[in-house]
Image (cartoon, rainbow, N blue to C red):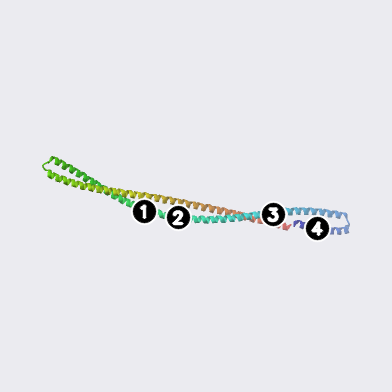
Amino acid sequence: MFLNIADRNCADVLHLLILKDKKTKKMSGGVNSIDAVKKKIKVLQDQAEKAEERAETLQKEVEKEKRSREEAEAEVTALSRRMQLNEENLDRAQERLATALHKLDEVEKAADESERGMKVIENRALKDEEKMELLEVQLREAKQIAEEADRKYEEVARKLVIVEGELERAEDKAEHAESKSRELEEELKTVFTSSKSLEAQSEKYCQKEDRYEEEIRSLSNKLKEAENRAEFAERTVAKLEKTIDDLEDSLTSARNANMELQATLNQTMEELNSC
């Protein structure tokens, strides 16, 4: 296109020069005018070649700017797509964070209930300990009574050896002492049985306490895991937010570059039109 314009301009100039030359020949008839026309034609040809070279250079620059603009537009499109994907990832991360917070709340409630249960168990264990202490006191008293009965029995036996004349009365006392001893033995057996039952009950409570402690440890571990997941979700959200900020900065830079390319292209077109 630019070559055709230059050729037409040169042809017009040549035509004008030829007309002018004809007039000059009529007036002065001269060889000098032909030489001048040839020189002017040479100058115009040089100018036309330079204009052609300038047009080719500008055409290449326009094509280069066009390719740069297309590449910038493609990069902007890719950045927009990546930003959309990051927004979707952010939404999913926020949903996971909400789920983790909900689970954390449930775990905290379960931990509170377990703590209340532990307090009830501790109160029961305290009462059982008080009962055990009372039974131990009763057992010590029973042992003291039994020891006292033994001493009385030995005293009666000695009296039986020493006082043979009072054999009948001593035998009655001995029978009475034996009866008392049997009663004490039965009482001791009862106390011993009660003690065994209390020991079994205490062992049962210990087993329950161990089981509750295990449940509390399990709940504590679950709580810690939930807290770790919540912290990980928060870190992920922070990373995504930073990525979005970086993408927005890149998008702004790409837009600015595109505007600069557009301005350069407009300036180039204006220069071409002015030529």
Around disc 4, counting alpha carbons within 10 Å, would you say few (fewer than 14), some (14 to 19), or many (20 or more)? some
Amino acid beneath label 1: Gly
Distance of label 2 from label 3 (alpha carbons):
60 Å
Image quadrant in which the C terminus is located: bottom right
* Dot placed on the residue nearer the N-terminal end, 2 or 1: 2
Judge left or right: residue 19 versus residue 170. right
Q: Residue 205 or 47: which is nearer the viewer? A: 205
* Dot placed on the residue nearer the N-terminal end, 1 or 4: 4
Q: In this figure, which residue is indicated by the disc labeled 2?
A: 103
* Dot placed on the residue nearer the N-terminal end, 3 or 1: 3
Asked if marks 2 and 4 touch (Cβ < 8 Å), the reply is no
Asked if marks 2 and 3 touch (Cβ < 8 Å), the reply is no
Q: Position of residue 127 (x, y in %)?
A: 30, 51
Judge left or right: residue 100 versus residue 171. right
Asked if marks 2 and 1 touch (Cβ < 8 Å), the reply is no
Q: Position of residue 108 (x, y in %)?
A: 42, 54
Q: Secondary structure at mark 3?
A: helix
- Residue 240 seen from this side: yes
Mark 1 or mark 4, whichever is nearer to me: 1
Mark 3 or mark 1, whichever is nearer to me: 1
Name the disc covering residue 63, or none: 3
- Residue 138 seen from this side: no
Distance of label 2 from label 1 (alpha carbons):
21 Å
Around disc 3, counting alpha carbons within 10 Å, would you say few (fewer than 14), some (14 to 19), or many (20 or more)? few
Name the disc covering residue 117, or none: 1
Q: Residue 168 or 266: which is nearer the viewer? A: 168
Q: Secondary structure at mark 4?
A: helix
